Image: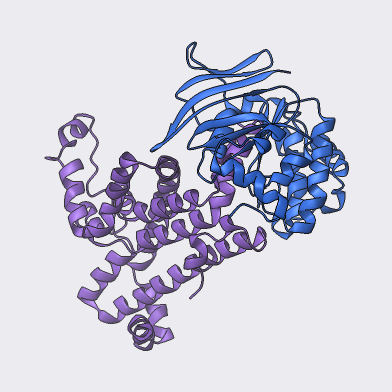
Chain colours: A purple, B blue
């Protein structure tokens, strides 16, 4: 299995020389795509954390049929192909879509804009963050939350001072996974946002475009993308373990899903 | 201070219907696993909502389904020490104890709350533990720290869920005496849930409520329950004491 996972990446590295990578980095597609990817994935991450954390908390604190239904809905984008999610987004925000007439009456166009890139990334990656965070919240001992309340803390204070710090390793691991997914988002972006250089052409789409003209540029772009992802993800994956260690040995809440994701 | 709890509550298929009352002296609740002891404490603390009934603590009504009163847990002034002590693993011992002064109505400045917390830690002879994290403490140390933390906001009632269950035999003996002295010194009510008849004896002859399947099956002074056990569980609870074996899991 390790071979199946590692060999293609090694082959990619072997297919390119440092000179090629430099050439790829100088390619006119490269910088705008990198900048766009960085901007959109950061915005997507912020949207996921701000909107996904309350949902995860709700799912974790209300066991029952309703939260199970919600959980399945959250999982859906993981199993639905991204291209299908792209079509679904078009059917929602496109000119003839569900909110199309309403949006055009406001003079707002979503498809084929940078906002569409963010929407595609959020829809496809948020489930990873929400599920990891809900799992992390579920692992927080209910007694700790009760004790915090009896010590005079409001529900909000209990959430921020007890639940979040204890769930943090799992939340960070989930955010790292979701960010990686957003960075690699291709199918939904292509269908819903298109492939417009500078506006909607993120790194994966730039790789796709480069491949049509010059395979070597595509390989170089891919390598830069692999390097950038690894660079971004390394601290995010080691962080949960570090945070977990802060609680010392034997604390159940510290050993969150983060430890399962940490390290190669 | 008189207090009374008469509540009906449901958690899934489990139904609790209990009537417990007392004054300043500690009251003991015994019962098999799953009999609703912890649920009852959580209902009193306000963590679980009772379906109906009434909870009074002195002059204050904490819950009354008829008038729609339900005071939030943070305003009940009920201290809760859960089974396993519930220390916050991400905070030092000192910050655990000071937690009751971090937010809410009793909020104090950082230096002030640390000073107060340090005094309480000294009270339970745990000053040396202040900078450590809970994961590094022994069971007995955790118990003392949890007690100090619960006492810091000066609760009007103290709820202790199996305060000695997680300790080894030697630590249990020392702490049992300590806890009994401490509860005797306090003039405020306490409810102690226990699995161990020796905890009951250590508290003198407290009022005991035996809970089974969510209902009080027998109540009275410990001596009375020991002499006239109403159910097989109560007989076993007090009976096994003579052999010195622990009747719990």
| Residue drawn where x is 39% and y is 70% of the image | A225
| Front residue of B233 and A108 | B233
Say if residue A96 shows up in the picture. Answer: yes
| Front residue of A2 and A49 | A2
| Residue drawn where x is 32% and y is 57% of the image | A198
| Residue drawn where x is 23% and y is 33% of the image | A107
Q: Where residue A57 appears, x then y in whole percent? A: 45, 42
Classify residue A61 as left or right of residue A242: left
- Relative to B217, residue A257 above or below: below
Furthest residue toward left: A96
Q: Where residue B29 appears, x then y in whole percent? A: 63, 36
Q: Where residue B83 appears, x then y in whole percent? A: 63, 46
- Quadrant of residue A125 within the rendered picture: bottom left
| Residue drawn where x is 19% and y is 59% of the image | A83
Quadrant of image for the N terminus of chain A: bottom left
- Relative to B150, residue A18 above or below: below
Q: Where residue A215 appears, x then y in whole percent? A: 26, 80
- Relative to B3, residue A160 above or below: below
- Quadrant of residue A39 within the rendered picture: bottom left
- Quadrant of residue A59 within the rendered picture: top left
- Relative to A251, residue B123 above or below: above
């Amino acid at each position: 299995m390790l071979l199946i996972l590692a060999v293609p990446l090694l082959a990619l590295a072997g297919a390119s020389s440092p000179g090629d990578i430099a050439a790829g980095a100088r390619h006119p597609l490269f910088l705008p795509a990198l900048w766009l990817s960085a901007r959109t994935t950061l915005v997507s991450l912020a949207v996921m954390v701000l909107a996904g954390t309350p949902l995860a908390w709700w799912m974790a604190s209300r066991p029952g049929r309703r939260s199970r239904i919600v959980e399945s809905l959250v999982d859906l984008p993981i199993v639905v192909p991204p291209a299908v999610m792209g079509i679904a987004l078009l059917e929602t925000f496109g000119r003839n879509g569900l909110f199309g007439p309403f949006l055009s009456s406001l003079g707002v166009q979503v498809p084929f804009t940078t906002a569409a890139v963010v929407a595609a990334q959020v829809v496809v990656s948020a489930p990873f963050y929400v599920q990891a965070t809900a799992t992390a919240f579920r692992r927080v001992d209910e007694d700790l939350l009760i004790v915090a309340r009896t010590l005079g803390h409001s529900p909000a204070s209990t959430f921020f001072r007890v639940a979040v710090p204890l769930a943090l390793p799992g939340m960070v691991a989930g955010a790292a996974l979701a960010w990686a997914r957003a960075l690699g988002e291709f199918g939904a972006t292509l269908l819903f946002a298109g492939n417009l250089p500078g506006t909607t052409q993120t790194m994966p789409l730039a790789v796709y475009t480069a491949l049509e003209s010059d395979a070597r540029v595509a390989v170089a772009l891919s390598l830069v993308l692999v390097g950038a992802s690894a660079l971004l993800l390394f601290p995010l994956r080691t962080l949960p373990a570090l945070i977990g260690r802060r609680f010392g040995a034997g604390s159940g809440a510290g050993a969150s899903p983060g430890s399962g994701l940490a390290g190669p | 201070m008189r207090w009374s709890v008469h509540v009906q509550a449901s958690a899934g298929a489990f139904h609790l219907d209990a009537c417990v009352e007392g004054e300043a002296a500690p009251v003991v609740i015994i019962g098999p696993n799953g009999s609703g002891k912890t649920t009852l404490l959580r209902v009193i603390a306000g963590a679980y909502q009772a379906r109906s009934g009434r909870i009074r603590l002195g002059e204050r009504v904490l819950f009354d389904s008829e008038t729609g009163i339900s005071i939030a847990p943070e305003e009940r002034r009920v201290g809760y020490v859960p089974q396993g002590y519930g220390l916050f693993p991400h905070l030092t011992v000192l910050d655990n104890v000071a937690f009751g002064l971090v937010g809410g109505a009793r909020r104090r400045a950082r230096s002030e709350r640390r000073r107060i917390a340090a005094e309480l830690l000294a009270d339970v002879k745990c000053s040396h533990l202040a900078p450590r994290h809970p994961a590094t403490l022994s069971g007995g140390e955790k118990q003392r720290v949890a007690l100090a933390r619960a006492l810091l906001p000066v609760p009007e009632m103290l709820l202790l869920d199996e305060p000695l269950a997680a300790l080894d035999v030697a630590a249990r003996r020392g702490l049992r005496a300590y806890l009994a002295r401490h509860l005797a010194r306090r003039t405020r009510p306490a409810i102690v849930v226990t699995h161990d008849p020796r905890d009951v004896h250590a508290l003198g002859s407290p009022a005991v409520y035996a809970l089974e399947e969510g209902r009080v099956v027998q109540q009275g002074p410990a001596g009375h329950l020991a002499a006239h056990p109403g159910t097989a569980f109560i007989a076993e609870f007090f009976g096994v004491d003579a052999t010195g074996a622990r009747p719990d899991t």
